[in-house]
Image: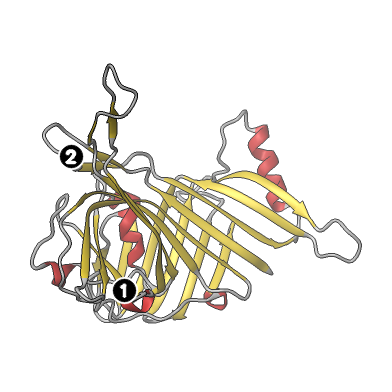
Amino acid sequence: MVRTGASAYIKYGFETSYGAVTGTYENTINKSFGLQDKMSSLTLTNNKVNLAKLNQNTVDRFAYGQQSGSASVSFTLSNPWLFGMVLSAPVSTGSSPYTHTWQNSTLLPEARTVQIEVGINDSTNMTRRLKGGVVGAVAISTSVGGMVECSTDITYGQETTPTTALTPPTKPTQESPYTFAHAQLTFAGSVVAQCQDVSLNLSQNAELLYGLNSHSAVDAYKKVLDITGSFKAAWQDKVLLQHLLDQLLANGTGETIGAGSDPELEFKLTFTKSATNEIITINCYGLTLNDLGLSGLEPVEVLFSDVSFTAKTIKVVAKSLMATENG
């Protein structure tokens, strides 16, 4: 019988150490990525090596190398826990509603890894557990008329023999879809008027680490955190152009930073469903403009500024009725 996505589910959770979790698997790996989540690709490879032999022109036998897998997951933003995939665990304070903060100063030196379960309900059932996964990047974007869309690319280094027990995700307990109408962008201290689209990419450049005596990965590590983004908005004035020109006139120093403790040029993206218990605020600091485009230079067309940037640091603050990531 042909199966569709109606017979399958995906869920994830954070590992306490590489390839392991605390407590029973079902109580820890229990979260959906977001609403209308989908795994657009899932691949496992054994890095096979063909071994030839003298006196014949066909393959003699095979040897097998590193076990590695990859997956791509996309979903509609509905909860803040995706930031834990690239920014370590949050610091949670207060009481309902709780405040959760992800910040550079609290980043763990090692990569935080995830486990994913893929369940398919068929005649015998199949449950795959993808262990030791590192999220290479998280991308967030929205545009006028659309949802707030998120995507992740995941590499994992361990997978055990499939089982038959099916347990769909039960968390988060609080989630609802964010759309373009819930988003507000502040750039260089001012709300960006008539913003058409915005995107933010967080890449931790994580990689798996292999060792002798095992086909599976034994650990993971991350490199430099890359924070990049872009947005398109109706042209207002020359302020952004002046920022770009000032960078070029500053002998290549790059940033446009004020005299105060915070950088002058700030990117703040806010998603608000409820100002008291359902809000996500993303702040990026130490920005440098990559480029500035101007489109719409045609009769009776709207002039738009197309801006892309790179940031040094990031701080994400979320208010939620959930006390922890497993709430």
Residue 85 position (above or below residue 26): above
- Within 10 Å of disc 2 (Cα), the crowding (few <14, some 14-19, many 20+) is some
Q: Quadrant of residue 40?
A: bottom left
Left or right, 196 with reference to 41: right
**Residue 249, numbered label:** none
Q: Which residue is tagged 1? A: 8
Residue 86 position (above or below residue 143): above
Kindly identify the residue that appears in the image at 37 percent across and 46 percent down.
Answer: 204
SS at circle 2 = loop
In x, y percent, where is residue 19? 16, 52
Q: Quadrant of residue 1?
A: bottom left
Q: Which one is in front, 45 or 51?
A: 51
Q: Which one is in front, 69 or 92?
A: 69
Q: Which residue is tagged 2? A: 215
Q: Amino acid at mark 1?
A: Ala
Return the residue found at the far left.
Answer: 23
Query: What is the C-alpha distance between the residues marked 1 and 2?
Result: 28 Å
Q: Report how many numbered discs are placed on residues in the image.
A: 2
Q: Is any atom of residue 322 visible in this view?
A: yes
Q: Which one is in front, 75 or 111?
A: 75
Q: Quadrant of residue 188?
A: bottom right
- Within 10 Å of disc 1 (Cα), the crowding (few <14, some 14-19, many 20+) is some
Q: Are marks 1 and 2 in contact (CB under 8 Å)?
A: no
In x, y percent, where is residue 49? 28, 32
In x, y percent, where is residue 57? 34, 23
Q: Amino acid at mark 2?
A: His
Q: Which one is in front, 100 or 88?
A: 88
Residue 266 position (above or below residue 174): above
